[in-house]
Image: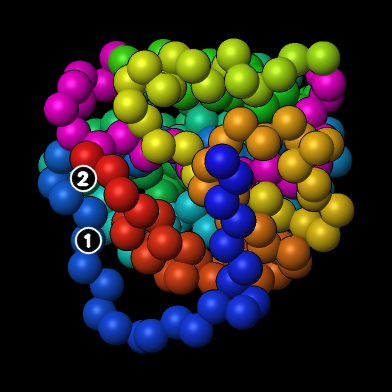
Amino acid sequence: MLVSFDLELMIFFQAPFSPLKLETDVLFLIDDSHDVNEELFYRQKQFVNLLYDHFNLSPNGPRGSALKYGDSAYYIVAFGDPSFKEKVNRTNLLQTPRRMDVALRKAAEVLARAGNDEGRKIVILLIAGEQANKMESLKDAVEPLRRLEAQIFVIAVGQNIASRNFKIDTLENVIRVPVSSRLKDQSKQIAVQIRDRPGK
């Protein structure tokens, strides 16, 4: 079931943000693909660091980790690293073909090694364009994450994103941000939506 949040129509109450539960791991997947320019890459990194603050992530938990992905997925920063924001800021744009399936499979490997068997696991996948390998369904790629009981949130950036093009109809919790410049302003609203979705 595809759940799409229309942030333009949402009435957001500016209440103090209560953080995630201590036993929570949040894994960010930053789109590093061929049609992502430097400005969009910067905005993604800024958005990730804002969510890190909104969630009150830290090495002592709840924890954050980040990967960037194109045709492969690469570590930016591991769970428990106190230099999360600095390493996200320093990571460079590589611009290779977009393989969301590769990113999701790598996310499952990272979460499986993280040792958080009982806590909540959240994967935040940023996408800004089409899947390079259109024959590769995301349905199989998400199965390892489902077995880990991870929640997957898709941040779809741009006006031309349709679920039929991205094969994201098998993913819940799709949050659309039509213009990348609004990622910063909508970061707290998105953090609230992610925090409040039912999970462990």
Is residue 122 in view from this perspective?
yes
| Residue visible at 43% across and 70% down in the picture | 188
Q: Earlier in the sequence, mark 2 or mark 1?
A: 1
| Residue visible at 27% across and 72% down in the picture | 17
Q: Disc 2 versus disc 1: distance between alpha carbons? A: 9 Å
Q: Which mark is residue 49?
A: none
Q: Which mark is residue 62?
A: 2
| Quarter where residue 123 is shown | top left
When the figure is inspected, residue 38 is found, relative to residue 143, above or below; the finding is: below
User: Which stretch did the figure color magenta?
Assistant: 113-134
Please check the rendered image and state whether residue 132 is part of the magenta-colored stretch, yes or no. yes
Query: Tag 1's secondary structure?
Result: loop
Amino acid at dot 2: Pro
| Quarter where residue 114 is shown | top left
Say if mark 2 contacts mark 1, CB within 8 Å: yes
- How many numbered marks are there? 2
Residue 57: x %, y % from top left: 26, 51
Furthest residue toward front: 1
Residue 55: x %, y % from top left: 30, 58
Amino acid at dot 1: Pro
Q: Which mark is residue 19?
A: 1
Is residue 39 in view from this perspective?
no
Query: Tag 2's secondary structure?
Result: loop
Decide if residue 26 is on the left or right side of residue 17: right
